[in-house]
Image (cartoon, rainbow, N blue to C red):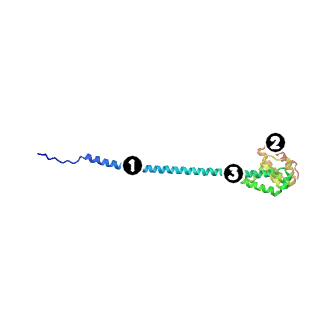
């Protein structure tokens, strides 16, 4: 005679194990999705960094070209200024040449030199001082005494030498010397000349103060 077998519910531990497996599967799927998204984001971030680097390289190239162009432009402007000054210097102590070319020629180049000087950061007085002895000679040969006197003042103010005979000749023609004396006093007090030129400036000052008679 068969014995009746009593039915028992499945152990609860099996249910927990099944649920854990399900959760594990879900979590793994979510983790895989996160990893996939992370990889995609990583690739996008890498692409962005590459694009940014390319852009920076292009900006650097443009900047270098601009700097190069600026240097070229600056060099051309400096050469233009030097050329104009050299034209004016060509008239120093050349009476026939200066007079043959005429006053308009020299004053056109003077104005052009002043404008070219502005382009490289030189103000008008700086330009005039750099070419002062040339313009003194040019105006002296053209017998433009007042203009020669104005450039004597520029020469006394900012150039490294001055000639007593030239000063005497020009001052005697214009009949005045107060601004020139003032420029000489200022320059002598700066002590920025060589000892020889310092003595020459002082000799010119003494002549104006003690010997010159209107």
x and y percentages locating residue 19 in the rendered image: 30, 49
State the CA–CA distance, disc 1 to disc 2: 91 Å
Please tell me whether mark 2 sits on a helix, a strand or a loop: helix
Disc marking residue 74: 3
State the CA–CA distance, disc 2 to disc 3: 36 Å
The residue that appears at 66% across and 51% down in the rendered structure is 70
Of 188 and 30, nearer the camera is: 30
Q: Residues within 10 Å of mark 2 (few under 14, many from 20)?
A: few
Q: Is residue 208 left or right of residue 11?
A: right
Q: Is residue 206 left or right of residue 26?
A: right
x and y percentages locating residue 36 in the rendered image: 42, 50
Please tell me whether mark 3 sits on a helix, a strand or a loop: helix
x and y percentages locating residue 207 in the rendered image: 86, 47
Closer to the chain start, of discs 3 and 1, is: 1
Of 47 and 162, nearer the camera is: 47
The residue that appears at 71% across and 51% down in the rendered structure is 76
Residue sitting farthest toward the front? 1
Closer to the chain start, of discs 2 and 3, is: 3
Q: Residues within 10 Å of mark 1 (few under 14, many from 20)?
A: few
State the CA–CA distance, disc 3 to disc 1: 62 Å
Name the residue tied to disc 2.
196
């Amino acid at each position: 005679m068969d014995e009746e077998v009593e039915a028992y519910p499945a152990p609860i531990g099996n249910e927990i194990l099944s649920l854990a497996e399900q959760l594990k599967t879900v979590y793994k799927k979510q983790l895989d999705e996160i990893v996939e998204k992370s990889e995609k984001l990583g690739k996008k971030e890498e692409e962005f960094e590459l694009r940014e680097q390319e852009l920076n390289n292009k900006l650097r190239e443009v900047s270098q070209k601009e700097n190069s162009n600026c240097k070229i432009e600056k060099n051309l402007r400096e050469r233009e200024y030097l050329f104009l000054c050299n034209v004016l210097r060509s008239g120093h102590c050349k009476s026939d040449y200066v007079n043959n070319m005429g006053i308009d020629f020299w004053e056109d180049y003077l104005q052009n030199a002043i404008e070219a000087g502005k382009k490289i950061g030189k103000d008008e007085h700086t330009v005039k001082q750099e070419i002062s002895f040339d313009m003194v000679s040019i105006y002296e040969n053209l017998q433009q005494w007042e203009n020669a006197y104005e450039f004597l003042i520029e020469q006394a103010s900012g150039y490294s030498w001055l000639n007593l005979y030239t000063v005497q000749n020009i001052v005697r023609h214009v009949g005045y010397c107060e601004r020139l004396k003032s420029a000489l006093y200022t320059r002598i007090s700066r002590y920025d000349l060589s000892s020889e030129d310092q003595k020459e400036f002082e000799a010119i000052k003494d002549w104006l103060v003690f010997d010159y008679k209107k």
